[in-house]
Image (tube, helix red, strand yellow):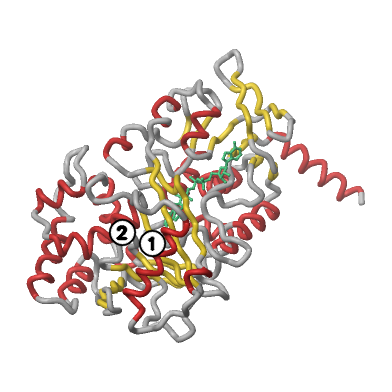
């Protein structure tokens, strides 16, 4: 009994000696930062304004994700978070990049690179595509251009196509779906350096880096449940309230933090602000990054989900790139018992699609044109559709935005650090960028 008391006291004392950090925001950046600080010996508290941890990655009670998220083998930091949560096994993992395209009418085209070292595997895979030789040679030429020197700062992807003479088929088949998925902007707006740099990481070093990982369960099981288990096991404090104000101290540091539930907290050695850019600027208008952060442009994602057709689908893939499915670019099968079919529109800025009904009709038309003949859809599928509109899904990865992204880590305010997918991580606004910014924090 006495021994237990002494050990409890010792642990109190050692806890007391540890530096403390408050992470504001329980999305991927905040959770990664919490893991990194915990591993570095900090006492960690997380303040999250919503009921659930995970930020922009969430699923509803029916297990439908707010927008399907896929990851790549090269997402090293994000995979570190999954390992900490014990949820890395909940994915269907490709061995190397396999991509299937679907054309109106249901025709499928498959890229299946052979087991050869990168990037030769990709070149051989492109050459083996079931396409006329001229198109295959165009694709080969385009992917070889990837290895050339990166274009100067400020170049858009469309401009790079012109400089490298990438033909229209190669643009629409290979580069454009990847650009929408990775950058969430169109080629005409995308920052070519950031995009090509990311593709080099994915396709340049090993076959596995470019492999697509799709979740086999709703994302809330992977992130929210994983995070809850982790913070419970590691004695991390979860403050269920939003932060309303960060109060600066007279000496240039930080005095206190106010919460929506009315309380104030003081005494943190470090605060990591891991909230989206506008909120970060609102909470710390006195920090030098704030003026630039408010200029960052957001880019939307819309997804329209339909109940699965009653007959089996003519493909087994979890994710398929659509050719000619505007405004939708991908179709995916939602994990979980419901297996809904989701159409995904990245950079969804089409001015003609305003209401829920507009989107559902567009989705229904798209499904009819891709699957209609192969697979008759039930008449009431439009009535059952679910729509998710995320107006600030990511930051727009344009050359202009690049100037407004501050580096993750310490700011000019003593004790105030920033993390988030909008910081300059070398990645676009993605799960990997968010995780990288969070894991960088304690080491900087
Ligand atoms: C529909 C959709 C599909 C996507 N698909 C992909 C994909 O396939 N692959 C990919 O890599 N990325 C994808 N992304 C992008 C990815 O989800 C984000 O880049 C990433 O989740 C951002 O994480 P974050 O921690 O930086 O920000 P967030 O997830 O926004 O986390 C910030 C957190 O801070 C909290 N917060 C805000 N203000 C306060 C406050 N005052 N006090 C306390 N808490 C506060 C918020 O509630 C939130 O939980 C997608 C995004 C969307 C929306």
Q: Residue furthest right?
A: 1
The picture quadrant where one finds residue 139 is: bottom left
Q: Position of residue 186 (x, y in %)?
A: 27, 51
Give the residue drawn at x 64%, y 21%.
255
Residue labelled 1 has its Cβ within 8 Å of some atom of ligand 1: yes
Q: Is residue 382 above or below residue 10?
A: below
Asked if residue 346 lies left or right of residue 38, the reply is left
Q: Looking at the picture, tell me which residue is in the foreground, 13 or 184.
A: 184
* Badge 2 vs badge 1, beta-carbon distance below 8 Å: yes
* SS for callout 2: helix
Q: Looking at the picture, tell me which residue is in the foreground, 380 or 317.
A: 380
Q: Alpha-carbon distance for marks 2 and 1?
A: 8 Å
Asked if residue 53 lies left or right of residue 159, the reply is right
Question: Which residue is tagged 1?
Answer: 72
The picture quadrant where one finds residue 106 is: bottom left
The picture quadrant where one finds residue 113 is: bottom left
Q: Position of residue 80 (x, y in %)?
A: 49, 56
Q: Looking at the picture, tell me which residue is in the foreground, 355 or 152.
A: 355
Marker disc for residue 274: none
Q: Few, some or many C-alpha atoms within 10 Å of disc 2 (few <14, some 14-19, many ≥20)?
A: many
Give the residue drawn at x 9%, y 48%.
163
Marker disc for residue 202: 2
Q: Is residue 311 above or below residue 317?
A: below
Residue labelled 2 has its Cβ within 8 Å of some atom of ligand 1: no
Give the residue drawn at x 48%, y 23%.
287
Asked if residue 30 lies left or right of residue 187, the reply is right
Q: How many marks?
A: 2
- Which numbered disc, 2 or 1, marks the residue that appears first in the sequence? 1
Q: Position of residue 47 (x, y in %)?
A: 64, 40
Q: Few, some or many C-alpha atoms within 10 Å of disc 1 (few <14, some 14-19, many ≥20)?
A: many
Give the residue drawn at x 49%, y 35%.
418
């Amino acid at each position: 009994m006495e021994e237990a008391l002494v050990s409890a006291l010792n642990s109190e004392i050692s806890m007391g000696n540890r530096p403390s950090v408050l992470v504001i925001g329980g999305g991927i950046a905040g959770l990664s930062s919490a893991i990194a600080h915990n591993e570095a010996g900090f006492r960690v508290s997380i303040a999250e304004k919503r009921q659930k941890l995970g930020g922009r990655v969430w699923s509803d009670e029916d297990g439908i994700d707010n927008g399907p998220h896929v990851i790549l083998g090269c997402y090293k930091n994000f995979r570190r978070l999954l390992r900490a949560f014990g949820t890395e096994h909940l994915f269907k993992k490709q061995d190397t990049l396999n991509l299937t395209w679907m054309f109106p009418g249901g025709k499928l085209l498959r890229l299946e690179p052979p087991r050869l070292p990168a990037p030769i595997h990709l070149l051989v895979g492109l050459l083996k595509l079931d396409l006329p030789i001229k198109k295959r040679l165009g694709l080969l030429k385009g992917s070889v251009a990837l290895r050339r020197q990166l274009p100067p700062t400020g170049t858009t992807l469309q401009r790079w196509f012109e400089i490298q003479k990438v033909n229209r088929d190669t643009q629409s088949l290979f580069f454009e779906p990847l650009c929408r998925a990775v950058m969430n902007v169109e080629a005409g707006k995308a920052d070519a350096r950031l995009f090509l740099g990311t593709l080099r990481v994915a396709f340049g070093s090993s076959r596995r880096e470019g492999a697509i990982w799709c979740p086999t369960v709703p994302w809330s099981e992977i992130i929210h449940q994983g995070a809850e288990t982790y913070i419970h096991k590691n004695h991390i404090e979860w403050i269920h309230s939003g932060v309303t104000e960060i109060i600066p101290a007279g000496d240039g540091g930080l005095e206190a933090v106010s919460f929506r539930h009315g309380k104030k907290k003081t005494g943190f050695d470090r605060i990591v602000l891991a909230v989206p850019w506008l909120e970060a600027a609102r909470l710390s208008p006195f920090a030098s990054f704030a003026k630039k952060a408010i200029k960052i442009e957001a880019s939307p994602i819309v997804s329209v989900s339909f109940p699965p057709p009653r007959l089996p689908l003519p493909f087994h893939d979890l994710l398929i790139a659509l050719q000619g499915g505007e405004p939708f670019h991908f179709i995916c099968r939602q994990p979980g018992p419901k297996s809904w079919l989701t159409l995904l529109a990245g950079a969804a800025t089409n001015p003609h699609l305003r209401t829920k009904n507009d989107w559902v009709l567009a989705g229904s038309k798209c499904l009819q044109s891709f699957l209609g003949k192969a697979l008759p859809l039930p008449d009431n599928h439009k009535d059952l559709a679910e729509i998710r509109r995320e107006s600030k899904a990511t930051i727009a990865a344009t050359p202009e935005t690049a100037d407004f992204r501050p580096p993750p880590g310490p700011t000019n305010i003593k004790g105030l650090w920033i993390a988030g997918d909008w910081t300059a991580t070398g990645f676009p606004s993605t799960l990997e960028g968010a995780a990288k910014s969070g894991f960088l924090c304690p080491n900087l």
